[in-house]
Amino acid sequence: MMKRLFFAFFALIMISNIAMSQDTLRIEILGIRNDENVIMLQLFNENEEVIRQEMSIIVEKKCTIIIEDLKPGKYAVRYFHDENGNGALDTNNLGIPTEGYGFSNDAYGMFGPKPFNEWLFEFNASKKIILKINY
Protein backbone atom coordinates (compact mmCIF):
# COMPACT_ATOMS: atom_id res chain seq x y z
CA MET A 1 0.00 0.00 0.00
CA MET A 2 2.76 2.42 0.95
CA LYS A 3 4.62 1.61 -2.27
CA ARG A 4 1.53 2.42 -4.40
CA LEU A 5 1.02 5.69 -2.54
CA PHE A 6 4.64 6.65 -3.14
CA PHE A 7 4.41 5.95 -6.89
CA ALA A 8 1.12 7.84 -7.17
CA PHE A 9 2.67 10.83 -5.39
CA PHE A 10 5.79 10.65 -7.57
CA ALA A 11 3.69 10.51 -10.76
CA LEU A 12 1.66 13.52 -9.64
CA ILE A 13 4.82 15.56 -9.03
CA MET A 14 6.24 14.61 -12.44
CA ILE A 15 3.01 15.54 -14.25
CA SER A 16 2.83 18.92 -12.50
CA ASN A 17 6.48 19.65 -13.34
CA ILE A 18 5.87 18.87 -17.01
CA ALA A 19 2.72 20.99 -17.12
CA MET A 20 4.44 23.95 -15.49
CA SER A 21 7.76 23.73 -17.31
CA GLN A 22 8.91 26.88 -19.00
CA ASP A 23 11.98 27.32 -21.10
CA THR A 24 14.69 29.80 -22.01
CA LEU A 25 15.00 31.92 -25.15
CA ARG A 26 18.57 32.98 -25.95
CA ILE A 27 18.84 35.88 -28.42
CA GLU A 28 22.22 36.70 -29.97
CA ILE A 29 22.56 39.94 -31.89
CA LEU A 30 25.56 40.16 -34.21
CA GLY A 31 27.08 42.86 -36.41
CA ILE A 32 26.91 45.68 -33.88
CA ARG A 33 29.22 48.48 -35.00
CA ASN A 34 30.66 49.31 -31.55
CA ASP A 35 30.37 48.46 -27.85
CA GLU A 36 28.84 51.83 -26.89
CA ASN A 37 25.95 51.74 -24.41
CA VAL A 38 23.27 49.02 -24.71
CA ILE A 39 20.84 47.03 -26.83
CA MET A 40 17.20 47.61 -25.90
CA LEU A 41 14.77 44.83 -26.79
CA GLN A 42 11.03 44.24 -26.61
CA LEU A 43 9.46 40.77 -26.66
CA PHE A 44 5.90 40.58 -28.03
CA ASN A 45 3.28 37.87 -27.82
CA GLU A 46 1.30 36.94 -30.94
CA ASN A 47 -1.28 39.64 -30.13
CA GLU A 48 1.36 42.40 -30.59
CA GLU A 49 1.47 43.03 -26.84
CA VAL A 50 4.83 43.80 -25.26
CA ILE A 51 5.33 41.18 -22.57
CA ARG A 52 8.97 41.85 -21.67
CA GLN A 53 11.49 44.63 -22.11
CA GLU A 54 15.16 43.89 -21.74
CA MET A 55 18.37 45.90 -21.87
CA SER A 56 21.80 44.35 -22.24
CA ILE A 57 25.41 45.42 -22.63
CA ILE A 58 27.42 44.87 -25.79
CA VAL A 59 30.68 42.92 -25.64
CA GLU A 60 33.00 42.61 -28.62
CA LYS A 61 30.31 43.95 -30.98
CA LYS A 62 27.71 41.35 -30.03
CA CYS A 63 24.96 41.10 -27.47
CA THR A 64 23.27 38.16 -25.80
CA ILE A 65 19.88 38.50 -24.14
CA ILE A 66 18.44 35.58 -22.19
CA ILE A 67 14.72 35.43 -21.45
CA GLU A 68 13.84 32.77 -18.91
CA ASP A 69 10.57 31.13 -17.93
CA LEU A 70 8.94 31.52 -21.34
CA LYS A 71 5.87 29.46 -22.12
CA PRO A 72 5.45 27.77 -25.53
CA GLY A 73 3.79 30.02 -28.10
CA LYS A 74 4.39 32.52 -30.89
CA TYR A 75 6.62 35.49 -30.15
CA ALA A 76 8.36 38.39 -31.90
CA VAL A 77 11.16 40.77 -30.96
CA ARG A 78 12.31 44.21 -31.99
CA TYR A 79 15.46 45.88 -30.74
CA PHE A 80 17.80 48.78 -31.27
CA HIS A 81 21.33 49.85 -30.39
CA ASP A 82 21.00 52.85 -28.08
CA GLU A 83 24.44 54.22 -28.95
CA ASN A 84 23.99 57.59 -27.26
CA GLY A 85 22.15 56.27 -24.19
CA ASN A 86 19.04 58.44 -24.55
CA GLY A 87 16.60 55.51 -24.36
CA ALA A 88 15.14 56.10 -27.83
CA LEU A 89 15.82 55.01 -31.41
CA ASP A 90 17.20 58.13 -33.05
CA THR A 91 16.21 59.03 -36.62
CA ASN A 92 17.17 61.67 -39.15
CA ASN A 93 14.82 64.35 -40.56
CA LEU A 94 13.25 61.79 -42.91
CA GLY A 95 12.53 59.34 -40.09
CA ILE A 96 15.27 56.93 -41.11
CA PRO A 97 16.99 55.36 -38.08
CA THR A 98 20.52 56.58 -37.37
CA GLU A 99 21.12 53.82 -34.80
CA GLY A 100 21.11 50.09 -35.47
CA TYR A 101 17.83 48.20 -35.17
CA GLY A 102 16.27 44.86 -36.00
CA PHE A 103 13.39 42.42 -35.77
CA SER A 104 13.02 38.70 -35.22
CA ASN A 105 13.47 36.64 -38.40
CA ASP A 106 15.60 39.60 -39.61
CA ALA A 107 12.33 40.97 -41.06
CA TYR A 108 13.48 44.19 -42.74
CA GLY A 109 11.27 45.97 -45.25
CA MET A 110 12.10 48.57 -47.89
CA PHE A 111 10.25 51.44 -46.18
CA GLY A 112 9.86 50.36 -42.58
CA PRO A 113 9.47 46.97 -40.96
CA LYS A 114 7.72 44.06 -42.59
CA PRO A 115 4.24 43.19 -41.26
CA PHE A 116 4.18 41.93 -37.67
CA ASN A 117 3.19 38.38 -38.69
CA GLU A 118 6.57 38.09 -40.46
CA TRP A 119 8.37 38.78 -37.18
CA LEU A 120 6.64 35.90 -35.40
CA PHE A 121 8.52 32.73 -34.56
CA GLU A 122 7.40 29.54 -32.85
CA PHE A 123 8.78 28.80 -29.39
CA ASN A 124 8.18 25.27 -28.10
CA ALA A 125 11.26 24.60 -26.00
CA SER A 126 14.51 26.27 -25.06
CA LYS A 127 16.06 27.74 -28.18
CA LYS A 128 18.62 30.19 -29.51
CA ILE A 129 17.99 32.69 -32.26
CA ILE A 130 20.69 34.68 -34.02
CA LEU A 131 19.86 38.10 -35.45
CA LYS A 132 21.84 40.56 -37.57
CA ILE A 133 21.46 44.24 -36.72
CA ASN A 134 20.72 46.74 -39.49
CA TYR A 135 22.40 50.17 -39.70
Image (cartoon, rainbow, N blue to C red):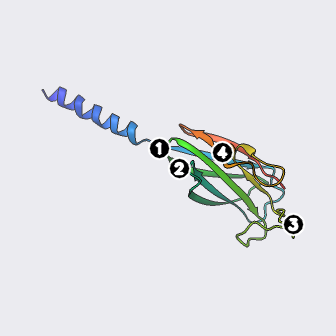
Q: Which image quarter is the N terminus in?
A: top left
Percent position (x, y) of residue 87? Answer: 70, 70
Amino acid under label 2? Glu
Q: How far apart are marks 1 and 2 (CA)?
A: 8 Å
CB-based contact (under 8 Å), mark 1 and mark 2: yes
Residue located beneath label 4 in the image? 117
In the rendered structure, which disc, 1 or 4, sits on the residue that comes first in sequence?
1
Amino acid under label 3? Leu
Residue located beneath label 3 in the image? 94
Q: How far apart are marks 4 and 2 (CA)?
A: 23 Å
In the rendered structure, which disc, 4 or 2, sits on the residue that comes first in sequence?
2
In the rendered structure, which disc, 1 or 3, sits on the residue that comes first in sequence?
1
Front: mark 3 or 2: 3
Q: How far apart are marks 3 and 4 (CA)?
A: 26 Å
Residue located beneath label 2 in the image? 68
Q: Which mark is residue 31?
A: none
- Which element carries disc 2, helix, strand or loop? strand
Say which residue appears at 73% left-offset and 49% top-offset.
29
Percent position (x, y) of residue 114? Answer: 74, 48
Q: How many marks?
A: 4
Amino acid under label 4? Asn
- Compare residues 79 and 22 and report the one nearer the observer: 79
Q: Which residue lies furthest to the bottom in this view?
A: 86
Residue located beneath label 1 in the image? 22
Q: In which quarter of the image is residue 88?
A: bottom right
Percent position (x, y) of residue 48? Answer: 59, 53
